[in-house]
């Protein structure tokens, strides 16, 4: 039996049990380097008093939270009825914060091979984001061409911590590759201020994690303004750009401010033919977690209307991170049924080219595969992976 | 005849006719350096296609816009019925972007002496912000003590471009001095990314002025989060902090995000005893220009309610900059009369300790002073300058 897809989770973190997991996928000399020195991702030095990972998500068999597909299934997908989820990695996003582009790109490739082998074949509900390093956009583009046609790879993901704004020409090879592979490009926070990335705020390094985390949205604002004004969406008209875990409500005033400035300063960006906010609504997608919680929930609903959430917003849980958002309780009362459906599933179905129906969980649980995998192979989508549904 | 004060303009730019204007106020060796090399403020390199100054504000007698008190009077104060305005300088804010603290602080002192002599005695409606350089907080504190008791100095101002967020301990001597002089501390944009300041965005240098300008709000967000979380308002309970020209609407989602994070992460900031948004509403003030202009003006009114504009927001024109906001047309229809009155005058009266009544313009114009100065000396306030009205 099948049912219409009800929930797609656009931000789930899969982890390695140990960094040794990637060694078999690394060529020399990178394998020896990683074996000797570890991955070497630089950190930003911020410490969260509540931890970053849910303690109850630690696999019983050991390893960090998110490192066992069976636990992700049993703790997230099954109980919440999540029909598909996008695995976006974790620490591996630090490959854009290293200094050595060859090593960084080799790590990204090894991760993607491991992702496909360990995760994307483990459950038909898993979809994957291919990680690239921005240190060498040409190598990143090759990596997208290498893995982009895998039926369960539905996205390209990069850390949002960056040396320059993501609209600048340096990155355009990456967007060209993503566009020709019909894949959206996503950014995810966590690498702000780490290694070669710019300091995490407009005034350098704030004192504590609460400040660093609160101000992550300002980095997403930076990238969105750059993508629009540097003409990325004019140059790559099929490209979609996904802001994962950067918050939502900051986008409304940003669009007001950018549109106002555009009226006066549009001769600086003569390639734009529409208001900046129109490019944003067409090309930018956001995930919900961590959703803002204003005192009056109607304020959040109004924000959803302003940012055109029916087109732009996708549910995400951020499992297994500390600030997990429950799919049934994270949203304000009073959201229209249409908007809720679009946020919970349809925007993601269209963006990622997911099937519109999913097998019932009872059938999945009866699956002969001990990993709970159904007979249907991953990626047997009713529309080609990554191609927007024609009904969009 | 007098009338109740109707309009206070919290952001007007006074300029030097030529940098030579400051030479008489500079001691050696700084005078020789400035005479030889100019002020030397580093720029950020951004170019506005519309210019930064209103072309129609250039004084008939020469010099840049904003350099002739008579023109400011005749083009701004008289025609718009502005009862008081705060002069916040301009390029001089670059003294926090230089490398040499002694030179930078000497320039700031020279500017403040020039401000008092050339401007604050020229019209009873002029009030001044004393400029300090952040390069040496101890010297900045001494400068505040030196000029802070002048009756027409109502504020301390610094450029918002900074090496580290304004809540950090490095700056606390400045806040201690401002508090003991009953002066609010203001920041003003323009120096983001210039000289020793941090790059102007979270991802370095954006491509164009429209991006740089749009993202200035993210720098104000950074400083506000830092001021609250680093405990400045707990340590300096009488301190008010004014965000000039940084926009308004970004503050609403920032408060939501910061309050939400505080619920989970408050043990990182154990000195806070209230929600972060409560500190913001009590201690942070914003000026209106450039006000956001959402398609539906009710959205801006709702933002005003959320940020408690009746307490926090002050009208500003930004004269003579290109994006001047007219006091009679800049605000959305539907604003309550109370809120409008608070924004147009009362919040500023309370913050700056201004008189509650002002002479009628006809009386001013009949003044025997050829500069239009009334008999009443500047600073003859009905409450002490800089001391909040007891009714606040």
Image: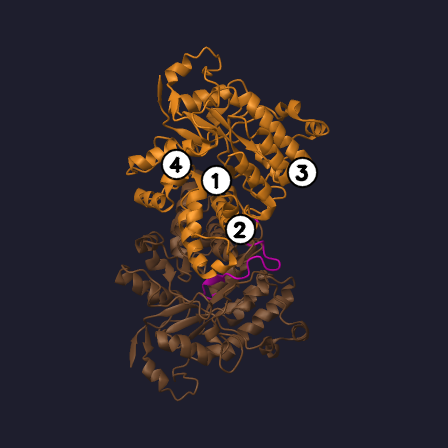
Chain colours: A orange, B brown
Q: Which residue is mark 2?
A: A230
Q: Sort mark 4 into few (<14), some (14-19) or many (20+) by Cα contacts within 10 Å.
A: few
Disc 1 from disc 3: Cα separation: 25 Å
Residue to which mark 3 is pinned: A101
Instruction: Kindly identify which chain the residue marked by label 4 belongs to.
Output: A
Labels 3 and 2: the sequence-earlier one: 3
Residue A337 is left or right of residue A371, and the answer is left
Q: Which mark is residue A392?
A: 4
Q: Earlier in the sequence, mark 1 or mark 2?
A: 2
Marks 4/1: CA–CA distance: 13 Å
Q: Are marks 4 and 1 in contact (CB under 8 Å)?
A: no
> Furthest residue to the bottom?
B368
Q: CA distance from mark 4 to mark 2?
A: 26 Å
Residue A40 visible in this rendered orientation of the protein: no
Mark 4 or mark 3, which has the lower sequence index?
A: 3
The answer to whether the residue labelled 3 contacts the one labelled 2, judged by CB atoms less than 8 Å apart, is no
Span highlighted in magenta in the image: B181-203
């Amino acid at each position: 039996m099948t049912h219409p897809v009800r929930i797609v989770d656009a931000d789930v973190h899969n982890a390695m049990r140990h960094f040794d997991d990637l060694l078999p996928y690394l060529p020399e000399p990178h394998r020896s380097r990683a074996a000797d020195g570890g991955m070497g991702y630089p950190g930003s030095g911020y410490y969260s008093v509540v931890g970053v990972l849910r303690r109850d998500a630690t696999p019983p068999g050991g390893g960090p939270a998110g490192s066992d597909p069976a636990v992700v299934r049993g703790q997230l997908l099954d109980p919440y009825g999540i029909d598909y989820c996008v695995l976006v990695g974790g620490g591996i996003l630090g490959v854009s914060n290293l200094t050595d582009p060859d090593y960084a790109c080799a790590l990204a490739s090894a991760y993607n091979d491991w992702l496909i082998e360990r995760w994307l074949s483990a459950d038909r509900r898993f979809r994957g984001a291919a990680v690239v390093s921005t240190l060498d956009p040409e190598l990143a583009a090759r990596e997208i061409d290498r893995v982009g046609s895998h039926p369960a790879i539905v996205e390209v993901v990069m850390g949002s911590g960056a040396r320059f704004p993501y609209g600048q020409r340096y990155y355009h090879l990456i967007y060209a590759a993503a566009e020709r592979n019909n894949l959206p490009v996503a950014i995810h926070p966590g690498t702000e201020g780490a290694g070669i990335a710019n300091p995490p705020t407009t005034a350098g390094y704030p004192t504590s994690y609460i400040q660093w985390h609160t101000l992550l949205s300002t980095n997403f604002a930076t990238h969105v303004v750059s993508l629009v004004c540097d003409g990325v969406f004019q140059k790559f008209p099929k490209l979609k750009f996904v802001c994962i875990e950067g918050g939502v409500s900051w986008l409304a005033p940003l669009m007001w401010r950018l549109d106002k400035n555009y009226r006066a300063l549009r001769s600086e960006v003569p390639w734009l033919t529409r208001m900046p906010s129109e490019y944003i609504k067409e090309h930018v997608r956001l995930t919900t977690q961590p959703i803002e919680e204003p005192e009056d929930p109607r304020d959040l609903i109004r924000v959803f209307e302003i940012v055109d959430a029916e087109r732009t917003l996708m549910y995400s849980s951020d499992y297994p991170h500390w600030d997990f958002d429950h799919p049934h309780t994270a949203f304000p009362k009073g959201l229209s049924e249409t908007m809720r459906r679009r946020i919970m599933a349809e925007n993601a179905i269209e963006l990622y080219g997911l099937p519109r129906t999913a097998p019932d969980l009872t059938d999945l649980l009866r699956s002969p595969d001990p990993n709970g995998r159904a007979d249907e192979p991953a990626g047997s989508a009713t529309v080609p992976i990554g191609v927007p549904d024609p009904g969009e």
